[in-house]
Image: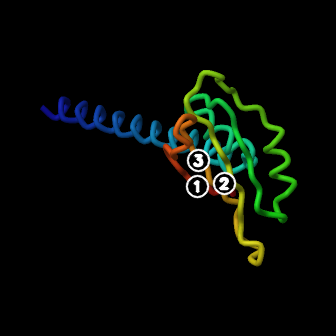
Amino acid sequence: MTNQFQHAIKFIIVICLTIGAFLVVKTYVKKPSVHNAQSQSKSDILKSYLLKNKKPQRVEIFSYTKRFENEVQEIKKMKVPQDPKAKFYITIQFFTDESDPAAPLIAQVRFIDITSENQIKEESLNLE
């Protein structure tokens, strides 16, 4: 009876150690992916957002900031796949609070129907 009890306890200890090792490895693997997301450039963040959606007919970019002019120029050079048969286009407006040096660059992305010029969807992205 004691021998069976000892085997059962050993089995439970092995299971607990295996689960603990799995959780440690899982936590270790997640940390680098979070670090990679934080190190993306502003254009990479915006491009990944645009690629998650359907392909637009065209993309129009407007900038209302002088402080982030270099980043906006980099974003304008970015290539986004387009579809000439799409029924919508995208406008992106960049702005920030020029008086606050810690203010982030905001991209206001609007999806607009081509035939009616009505706004389909609007989202604001913090590019910091």
Give x and y (percent) for residue 91: 66, 45
Label 1 vs label 3: CA separation? Answer: 9 Å
Query: 10 Å neighbourhood of mark 1: few (<14), some, or many (≥20)?
Result: few
Label 2 vs label 3: CA separation? Answer: 10 Å
User: On the picture, is 40 further left or further right than 4?
Assistant: right
Q: Residue furthest bottom?
A: 99
Give x and y (percent) for residue 30: 56, 42
In the picture, the disc for residue 1 is: none
Query: 10 Å neighbourhood of mark 3: few (<14), some, or many (≥20)?
Result: many
Q: Secondary structure at mark 2?
A: strand
Q: Which three-letter amino acid code belongs to the residue tagged 2? A: Ala
Q: Which residue is mark 1?
A: 124
Q: Which residue is mark 2?
A: 107
Choose top left, top right, bottom left or bottom right for residue 28: top right
In the picture, the disc for residue 110 is: 3
Please tell me whether mark 1 or mark 3 is closer to you in this view: 3
Q: 80 and 18: which one is in front?
A: 80
Instruction: Indicate whether 115 appears above or below 104.
Output: above
